[in-house]
Amino acid sequence: MARWVIIGCVLLSMIACNDSSGNRVGQSPYAHAAAEGNPHFDLPQIQQNGELIVLTLYGPESYFEFRGEDFGLQYMIVREYAKSIGASVRVEVSRNQKDLVEKLMNGEGDVVAYRVDMADSLAAVLDYVGGREMNAFLDSIARQRKDDSFRPREHSAWAVRKDSPLLSASLAQWMAEREGDFFEYTTIRVKSSNGRTYTPRRKVSSPILNAARGQISLYDDIFKKYAMQCGWDWRLMAAQAYQESAFDPEAVSYMGATGLMQLMPSTARDVGVSPSDVFDPQHNVRGAAKLISQLNARYAFIANADERLNFVLAAYNAGPGHVDDARALAKKYGKDPNVWLGNVDAYVLNMSQPEYYNQTEVKHGYFRGSETYDYVNSIRARWSEYRKKIH
């Protein structure tokens, strides 16, 4: 049985700014729906059900997927709130603010964990929550990272329906009390099986340890062993390892990827690398070789092995879902979805732009496409250098 009963209502024509049509607050297009008493879940029902349904948009500070795991500053904060009430999080992504509010009012979600613009026309049916706390946090992030894309918008906040007053009050109180912990909630830390906690770090080594002796790194024997298993030149795997970790077996990324080949926790599980082994070079590279083999099989329809390599590298970096989104856009705009240079790579570069990642062909939303683009090019360039110098 569906959790929510979806009700019909007149759609909201504008939420990005206050109502300028002269309508009074009570004339909100959702006011009638609220008055009809549409079925809903408040805090006790959410806790009993064990699931908080979060509505959001794709974006770097709201929600995005990376190598099969969920990220985004606001997502990570609402996930902590859900833990505090004994619930897990289920994310439902919309394409714009209008759709967010429409779904919230239709009962398709419990909370909008995205800074929607506060509209007077909705004040009768929505509670705006956490605007001050979230804006202060994102302002700090913007200054810390020197990135204006995180700058807060005035008169914006998360939203909860007024007919969920207990949820609204609980969330507002939690955000006020835990505002000082937002940085902690959004900082990735990795715990090893022996209890050691790793924060993001990477110790940079030389890209070639000893050219005269034909030695790229301390881990060449491991690369030679497992490159054979996935059909790669071992120097290519070494080039990828340098791009991933600079040959630091204890490297941890800001996204929680670990080890020489930077396996994400879920990826490590999928390829049979246990948490106790993820920092061990042998196990980490073995897991990476298995993932590379899987990606080679996924893109086997690209007959040219050298061309296929571009897609395998891109998918290793961003996840195959994001790469396939870029392929879909390339096809839409008349490019070859099976050719990287000048075709798919152009759409990978644009996947951090809302006008691209919000298109209907895109199933996995935002990702930092410029990093994936540079990743492919850097590994190929370093591999070329290794082939010239190491025989």
Image (cartoon, helix red, strand yellow):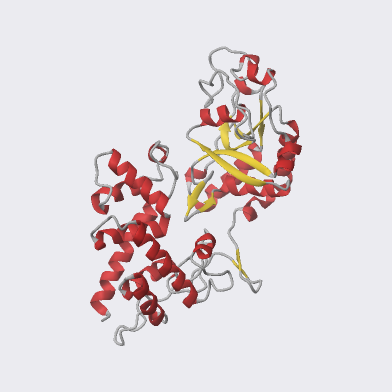
**Residue 208 drawn at (x, y percent):** 34, 78
Residue 369 visible in this rendered orientation of the protein: yes
Furthest residue to the front?
1
Residue 375 visible in this rendered orientation of the protein: no
In the rendered image, the quadrant that contains the N terminus is top right
In the rendered image, the quadrant that contains the C terminus is bottom left
Report which quarter residue 354 is drawn in.
top left
Front-most of residues 108 and 250: 108
Give above or below for 3 relative to 372. above
Give above or below for 72 relative to 306. above
> Is 156 displayed left or right of 147 in the figure?
right
> Is 50 displayed left or right of 225 in the figure?
right
> Is 232 displayed left or right of 97 in the figure?
left
**Residue 217 drawn at (x, y percent):** 39, 80
**Residue 320 drawn at (x, y percent):** 40, 53
Front-most of residues 250 and 8: 8
Front-most of residues 199 and 270: 270
Query: Residue at the spot x=53%, y=45% of the render?
Result: 63
How many numbered marks have been drawn onto this rendered protein structure? 0
Furthest residue to the top?
22
Query: Residue at the spot x=24%, y=46% of the render?
Result: 336
Give above or below for 319 relative to 149. below
